[in-house]
Amino acid sequence: MRDSLTLAQAIDRYVASIEGAGYSANTLKAYSTRLNDFLNWVVADAGGDTATTSPVALQEPDAIQSYLASLRRRKIGRRIGVSNQTLSHAYAVLSGFHRWMERTLRLEPNPMRDVLRPRADSSIDDEFHSLTSTQLDELLEVARNGWSRGSGPPDLRTTNRKLEDWLLVAFMGLAGLRVSEVCGIDGGDIVEDVVHVLGKGRKRRSVPLAPEILEALAEFHSPSGHRHLFGSPKDAARRLAPYSVEQRIPRLAQRAGILELRVTPHVLRHTFGSLMLAADPTALVPTRDLMGHESVETTNKYAHTREEARRMALQSMHELRRRS
């Protein structure tokens, strides 16, 4: 069977093998996209379609290293190179795939053992960019009430679209939901003052909602006759896609005058975590539960992203020394 298996078929089999391991649909899609991107690179490097028609074979470590290096040079919109996080994810996906080929297809030696892991050049603060409380308020204000003429083209959004934009920002920035969780909300998932979301690993959790979110929901008109809360702008019968939100949020941030960083759904979620722990540094476990983290160690990283918190800690230490 292995002798007739192509690299493309091996990728399909690997993705199918992890479907029952508790991975979310978005994670499975990300794995498939990355591995097929690797396949296309291998095909292009071979000068044809040999990778799809020839029996599967292990690539040399240098070839895999070259693929990872090519991601550093890839043009993505106006930017050159993928982020450190994306590069690390690519390495992890390729490692998992090659471990599977070694274990299931008996292909040895595993070339990933000789592939250098990408360096994480960014600090915790770089990986966990977040907004200040004032910036979050400014973003919510622009989402709900529009922007001045000098901040961009005329605001042609309908009142309901403005409410939708505000809710998208609020669900991530004030409730800590992932963008995929926000897009996955159905009208029936909101019971009284709690939203029930399906998170990573298909684990459900309940997140209390602030009164201002509940007030906006009472005014918002979800797509008529459909279960989902947010519909696609072009076809309300379809659920709003995460990539649509990922395009919308940075534009709103620019209109709000937030230009020092690119505001993404991840940044809004990080903002929630960092503001929660800035308000109460002891609230690690509640913040972990609200954000759906597996480990409190992940949540603890947000405690180190707030310069104000670091300054307060140093001040407390100095005051303690003076009293002593």
Image (tube, helix red, strand yellow):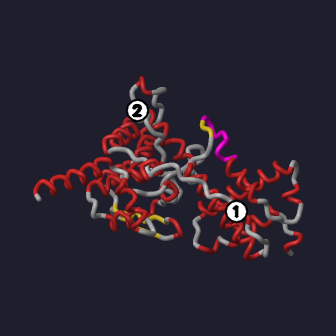
- Going by the numbered disc 1, the residue's amino acid type is Asp
Position in image of residue 247 (x %, y %)? 54, 42
- Going by the numbered disc 2, the residue's amino acid type is Gly
**Looking at the image, which residue is at 49% across and 70% down?**
203
Position in image of residue 139 (x %, y %)? 38, 40
Q: Spot the residue most to the top.
A: 150
74 part of magenta stretch: yes
**Looking at the image, which residue is at 68% across and 48% down?**
69
Q: Spot the residue most to the left.
A: 323
Quadrant of the drawing holding the C terminus: bottom left
Residue 254 in sight from this viewpoint: yes
Q: Which residue is mark 1?
A: 114
In the shown orientation, is residue 66 left or right of residue 320? right
**Looking at the image, which residue is at 72% across and 51% down?**
67
Secondary structure under tag 2 reads loop
In the shown orientation, is residue 5 left or right of residue 79? right
Tag of residue 257: 2
Could you say which is closer to the camera, residue 189 or residue 17?
17
N-terminal-most mark, 1 or 2? 1
In this rendering, is residue 111 above or below 130? below
Circle 2 residues within 10 Å: few <14, some 14–19, many ≥20: some
Secondary structure under tag 1 reads helix
Circle 1 residues within 10 Å: few <14, some 14–19, many ≥20: few
- Closer to us: mark 1 or mark 2? 1
Residue 268 in sight from this viewpoint: no
Q: CA distance from mark 1 to mark 2?
A: 46 Å
Please report the bounds of the magenta region as a residue range.
70-78
Could you say which is closer to the camera, residue 290 or residue 168?
290
In the shown orientation, is residue 177 left or right of residue 307? right
In the shown orientation, is residue 314 left or right of residue 305? left
In this rendering, is residue 269 above or below 143? below
Tag of residue 91: none
